[in-house]
Image (spheres, rainbow, N blue to C red):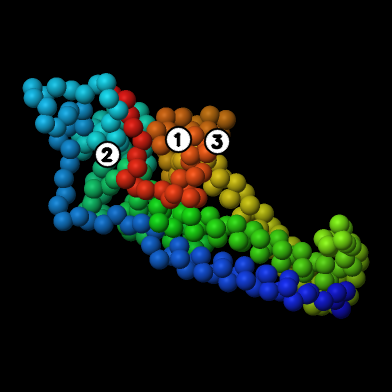
Amino acid sequence: MPFREILLWENLLLVTMGLLLINNVMRLRDSPGVVHRPQKQHYYPDSRMIDGQSGGETERDFPKSIEEMTAPTLPASDVTWIDSRPITDGKLSTWCSHCSVKKPPRSGHCRLCNQCVRIRDHHSIWLDTCIGVENHSAYFMVLLQTIFCGYYGSQLSMTTICTPEIYFDWFLVPNDCRFLYIDFRTAISFVTVCYMLVVTTLVVIATIWQLIFISQNVTQQEFSTAKRKGWVNQKIFVENNVHDQGIIMNLMEFFIVGRKSENTGKIQV
């Protein structure tokens, strides 16, 4: 038997957040930012040469974008920055044979989706979609809303099936739960809440990792590449990240301005 009734505004708050959660899930499943095949494919003839200069003069004093630095023949030893594209036969692979497209910087091919995604972060098996440039912010909002619904729903359930105690004249916490297993419905509710708390805590951990990546302007795919190359300090800080603009600018770009696949870091050559 419940010890209190859940108020109308509490129900409305939880239902509203749940509807927003469903809306964001539908949004992020629309398109992660697929790399489409242009009408004309082209490559830079030499990643270390300036087009249009007489005598084949090389550029060594000015920064160049990653797009300009990644010709089809670029050796792996020349890739001194984090690049999510794979190394094949000792060279940086800028062409996807599966999709028949040139892969721009920070893109990646997903074997499950069978498509290349711009600024690919990872493939979410729970949502069955890739997380890329066009749905990454919606994915982060889904994480936050899942945390809210999980913890707030658990709090409402526990303060209903247990004797609640009030703090600060408004905040309820479960106090006496001795009679949980007297009634079958309260027992089921308690077990469900326990599972919900475990799942929500795992989502919190995933959200913290996402914040670490966003604050460095690095994707999960790029982080994995840096980890394989030994470019990760203290298990979270990435070296040779040409996309890093500082924590404040990285957060502003992700949450306010929005990431652009055309904006790549500059490399001094």
The residue carrying pointer 1 sits among few (fewer than 14), some (14 to 19) or many (20 or more) residues within 10 Å by Cα, namely some
Using the image, tell me which numbered label, if any, was put on residue 245.
1
Q: Separation of disc 2 and disc 1 at Cα?
A: 18 Å
Q: Which dot, 3 or 1, sits closer to the camera?
A: 1
Q: The residue under label 3 is which amino acid type?
A: Ile
Q: The residue under label 2 is which amino acid type?
A: Glu
Q: The residue under label 1 is which amino acid type?
A: Gln
Label 2, secondary structure: give it: helix
User: Image point 33% across, 57% down: which residue?
Assistant: 34
The residue identified by callout 3 is: 236
The residue identified by callout 2 is: 67
Is residue 210 visible in the rendered structure shown here? yes
Q: Separation of disc 3 and disc 2 at Cα?
A: 26 Å
Task: Determine whether 266 is above or below 3 in the image.
Answer: above
- Position in image of residue 93 (x %, y %): 27, 41
Task: Determine whether 109 is above or below 4 in the image.
Answer: above
Report the quarter where the C terminus lies: top left
Q: Separation of disc 3 and disc 1 at Cα?
A: 17 Å
Q: Which dot, 2 or 1, sits closer to the camera?
A: 1
